[in-house]
Image (tube, rainbow, N blue to C red):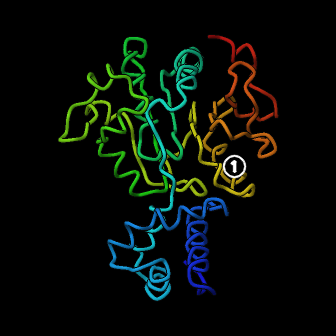
Amino acid sequence: MSVSAPDTAFTGAMRVLASLLESRTGQILSENRMWRIETALKPVLRANGLEDLEALVRRLLSSAERQLSDDVVNALLNNESSFFRDLQMFQMINREILPHIRANRSDKVVRIWCAGCSTGQEAYSLALQFRKDAETWKGWRISILATDISTSAITRAQSGIFSQIDVQRGLPINDLLTWFEPAGDDWKINEDLRRMVDFRTDNLLDPRIPGGHFDLILCRNVLLYFSLEMRRKVFDQLARYSRPGTFLLLGAGETVIGQTDEFVSSRDFRGSYERRSSLGEMAEPAIRRAR
């Protein structure tokens, strides 16, 4: 980390901390989101016996302790997530996109990447859909990779343990009772479902995930916090792990328009995008529509 001492106490400290987040993750805290800094870092202050943000910045500037820097970045990241967030999108995946992929993959392998997966609810929602439709996918190899830059979020996701509030947000009661078991005051996901997802800490700006191409990439509500330059870099990385016709799903407030030439709006599935062919056109209609 390379930061300069704050010029004023409180405002200067916030700007140094926002700069740390941007240098480590590419994410920008806009002026109207600066209020999050003090609230998000209160647990870090308490854990380290620090009185205020200025004291935290002084510690960061005078110390080489990586753990404190990691704790600050983890606290400032937005780990908002829920099961089946945006239900219509999950319905489109299950009823339209996955049947299309199934009809066009002779090797019976489906590879999905949840980029910026937060605490895991999105990836587990996909795993749950596959498991509930197990007969349809019998004989197929389903690979779900879920990555996030937040080490604390990935640790929570890997545990498969969710609070009562977590499971009440988007998870149908029947699914809760079928696929989870009580764990004290929390709920733990079924072990078979947990093993379906490979969670890894990774940076979208320089991913080090296994090579190869994915059939479906979800990168939802992540790019909102990046500058245009950083968003273009992320799209370049997503394209690197795509093949012509790979589907990309973004958040409701995100788009590829004006951001990248690597992906275009899908003709068949409204609200989704597809990787361009090497010729700059969509995949051949005869192949795309064989579903």
Q: Is residue 105 visible?
A: no
Q: Amino acid at mark 1?
A: Asp
Residue at x 59% of width, y 69% of height: 18
Circle 1 residue: 236
Residue 130 locus on image (x, y percent):
41, 22
Residue at x 40% of width, y 74% of height: 68
Q: How many marks?
A: 1
Residue 94 locus on image (x, y percent):
52, 19
Residue at x 59% of width, y 87% of height: 5
Residue 288 locus on image (x, y percent):
69, 18
Above or below, 3 relative to 235? below
Above or below, 30 relative to 243? below
Residue 237 locus on image (x, y percent):
64, 49
- Nearest to the observer: residue 201 or residue 223: 223
- Nearest to the observer: residue 83 or residue 40: 40
Relative to 33, 279 lies left or right: right
Identify the image quadrant of residue 287: top right
Identify the image quadrant of residue 286: top right
Residue at x 59% of width, y 43% of height: 221
Above or below, 217 relative to 287? below
Looking at the figure, which quarter contains the N terminus?
A: bottom right
- Nearest to the observer: residue 176 or residue 127: 176
Relative to 163, 127 lies left or right: right
Q: Secondary structure at mark 1?
A: helix
